[in-house]
Amino acid sequence: MSLAAAIRDRDPAALPSRRDEVWRWTDLRGLIREVPPPSARMDPRDLGPGVFDHLATSSYVVANGLEPVRIEISAGERTIVALRFVSRGQGAHAALAEIRLGEGARLRLLETYEGEGAYLADASLSITLSPGAVVERIVLADDDPEAVSVSHANVKLAAGSEFGQIVLTSGARRQRIETRVVHPDGGAKLRLDGVYLLEGKRHADLTTVVEHQGLDGVTMQMTKGVVRDQARGVFQGRIVVAEGADRTDARMEHHALIVGDRGEVDAKPELEIYADDVACSHGNTIGALDQEALFYARQRGIPEPEARALLTEAFIGEVVDRVWLEGAREIVRRWAAQRLRGA
Amino acid sequence: MLTVSNLHAAVDGKEILKGLTLEVPAGEVHALMGPNGAGKSTLSYVLTGRDGYEVTAGSATLEGEDLLALSPDERAARGVFLSFQYPLEIPGVPALTFIRTALNAQRRARGEAEISAPEFLKLARRTAQSLKIDFEMLKRPLNVGFSGGEKKRMEILQMAMLSPRFLILDETDSGLDIDALKIVAEGVNALRAPDRAMLIITHYQRLLDYIRPHRVHVLSAGRIVASGGPELALELEREGYDKYARAA
């Protein structure tokens, strides 16, 4: 069952449904009666520049799913790549991108999802690292509120490699951003961070699956969400430590704020540990803004809407401030502030 | 300056303040003492407009303006400042950002221009120095990981920078060692001014050795049951609150 197969065959029965445990909070089968016809072809040259283009050495566009993108970063090369998945219209499409890094290569990947319309989109990305390679991936997802969008990245680490990721999303009618990472040889460092800021009836699902198969792997994970109106946030984090993957250090945290009384957050942190000598932990909180802190700020003269915005921005600031590329950090901060203060 | 008249207030439907009347004139420092549960903190929250504190009768005015009709931030902009017994930790917001946001919000509410960044930093440096606060601490998230004494000093620093007209200090001495207490008291005394008034809420007389009040009031079971000069605080220290508990 996959969205890509359902789009290819125009077969709604192939859509992931709530019967699949890992899709139970992001049911597509129940939502989509009929898979729309393929999206119209688009000329990427008709698009304006992307938000990150000015920061990048090179820029790639996947428009309505056409033309798979293959990016090779040779050994020792350092580069910044902007990768845009653009969707327009009411059709269905699947996109494909593949990135390979040579030994010691360093990639800063600035990835965006940009959409207009009630499209059905699938994006599949594979990233393979050689020993000592470093990837820093920022994903800024701005899908249409009427769209259904799924992105899944498969990341394969190597000994001594590092992979850091920050996903920021405002959701869609139904949206899932999934990241699967394998530590095959151990000794790699992984950071998976995320922020979801949802309003209206938007839905965002941040799902991660991390497998530690070797010694001395590190996984650090921090996801924060703010949900208002009737929006729904989903966090599924799974870390598997295989037998023999000793001295794994894995920490997962997810914290969400629900503003108002109609929002919903579903969280499922899972640690599956088959090794003996590991340090693993997870923390998960879902709640409202601290009323005492809110009163404290108001007592100092800060009006309620501003106090709420200040405290909420501070809440997600812990993750947003981790965006390593300065220019990108400013873009992301503005994006978050607009979503938090605009409502 | 502050006039509280026959104030009744309830929390969760339970009446805590039962006809409290109090007048603090400009230029004066008054102490409010009383046993636990007398309603001392409730008064501070009612005067600052905290949710959940319901005024059922009476009035509270600041220079003739009805405080109870205003939101907490409007009261702050009019010059009401509460130094919290337990100052809140605000993760992710550097102290400087928090104070500048508050100061500018108050200025906007009063129709004044915002403070410029260099002017603000100068004010912050000067105030921190006078309270023996390391300026670097102001770059850290407000109160996060600060000791009890540091938090209280941060309250006084905010008070000095926001320059309020009516100051309420709720159990400011709790959790302070004697050196910290002296620094805090000096900071408070430096704010004494003819156009400013203070209400010092305290359980113990100790703080009043360092911040000398003009008047002392005893609060028991939601009402002021005795008022007098500073000697009243010494009497309470010797004899306790028992006789006032009966009087109430």
Image (cartoon, helix red, strand yellow):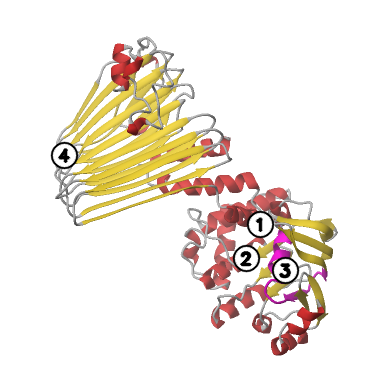
Which amino acid is tagged 4?
Gly
Nearer-the-camera pick, B217 or B128: B217
Specify the subunit that label 4 lies on: A
Nearer-the-camera pick, B201 or A208: A208
- What residue is at 47 percent from the left and 60 percent from the top? B140
- Could you tell me if residue B170 is visible in this image? yes
Check residue A244 in the rendering and tell me which mark sits there, or answer none: none
Q: Are marks 2 and 1 in contact (CB under 8 Å)?
A: yes
Nearer-the-camera pick, A110 or B44: B44
Which amino acid is tagged 1?
Gln
Specify the subunit that label 3 lies on: B
- Point out the stretch of residues depicted in magenta: B21-48
Q: Given this view, does label 1 or label 4 mark the residue nearer the observer?
A: 1
Looking at the image, tell me whether mark 1 or mark 4 is earlier in sequence order: 4
Seen in the picture, residue A212 relative to A295 is either above or below; the reply is above
Check residue B39 in the rendering and tell me which mark sits there, or answer none: 3
Alpha-carbon neighbours of circle 2 within 10 Å: few (<14), some, or many (≥20)?
many
Q: Are marks 3 and 1 on the same chain?
A: no
- Quadrant position of residue A24: top left
**Residue B118: image location, x then y, percent:** 56, 56
- What residue is at 32 percent from the left and 45 percent from the top? A270
